[in-house]
């Protein structure tokens, strides 16, 4: 669970680092796997948070709100977002290898989500939520 929370916090950090100058043109950025993985994780986390918040509100605020934040970092949701974000550009021949530190960091974030996804699918009972 700790690794999922750490990987969840690095995805927006990579996007912030990528937006700093000097940065490559947007066309090049969209072809870098590390930079492509991080928006997928951020969008999946927003989707997951909205779904969990909706359930929390519908159930009339029963439960504990920090549990909502813990459930948000789910490797199945984020690993499932990184896989198509990498498969589609690779299949279209638009994949460029990591050339700078920021993209390599994003690549590490994406690889960590794929590894956490594989671990979660292999042993779903190994990591339990609160």
Image (cartoon, helix red, strand yellow):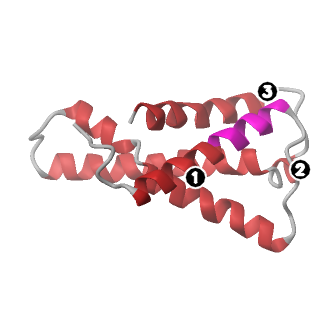
Which residue sits at x=88%, y=54%? Answer: 96
> Contact, CB < 8 Å: mark 3 with mark 1?
no
Residue with the mark numbered 1: 114
Instruction: Give the dominant element type of the magenta stretch: helix, strand or loop.
Output: helix
In this view, the mark in front (3 or 1):
1
Say few, some or many: other residues with alpha carbon within 10 Å of mark 1 (under 14 / 14 to 19 / 20 or more). Answer: many
- What's the distance in space between the residues labelled 3 and 1, CA to CA? 26 Å
Q: Is residue 36 magenta?
A: no
Residue with the mark numbered 3: 20
Say few, some or many: other residues with alpha carbon within 10 Å of mark 3 (under 14 / 14 to 19 / 20 or more). Answer: few
Q: Is residue 106 magenta?
A: yes
Helix, strand or loop status at disc 2: helix
Residue with the mark numbered 2: 28
Which quadrant would residue 42 be assigned to in this image?
top right
> Contact, CB < 8 Å: mark 1 with mark 2?
no
Q: Which residues are magenta?
A: 101-109
Helix, strand or loop status at disc 3: loop
Q: Position of residue 59 (x, y in %)?
A: 11, 50
Which residue sits at x=15%, y=52%? Answer: 58
Helix, strand or loop status at disc 1: helix
């Amino acid at each position: 669970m700790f690794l999922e929370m750490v990987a969840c916090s690095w995805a927006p950090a990579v996007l912030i680092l990528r937006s700093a100058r000097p940065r490559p043109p947007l066309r090049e950025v969209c072809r870098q796997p590390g930079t492509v993985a991080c928006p997928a994780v951020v969008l999946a986390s927003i989707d997951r948070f909205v779904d969990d918040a909706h359930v929390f509100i519908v159930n009339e605020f029963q439960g504990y709100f920090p549990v909502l934040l813990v459930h948000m970092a789910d490797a199945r949701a984020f690993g499932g977002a990184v896989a198509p974000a990498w498969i589609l550009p690779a299949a279209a021949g638009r994949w460029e290898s990591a050339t700078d530190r920021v993209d390599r960091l994003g690549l590490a974030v994406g690889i960590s989500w794929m590894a956490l996804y594989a671990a979660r699918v292999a042993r779903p009972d190994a990591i339990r939520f609160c």
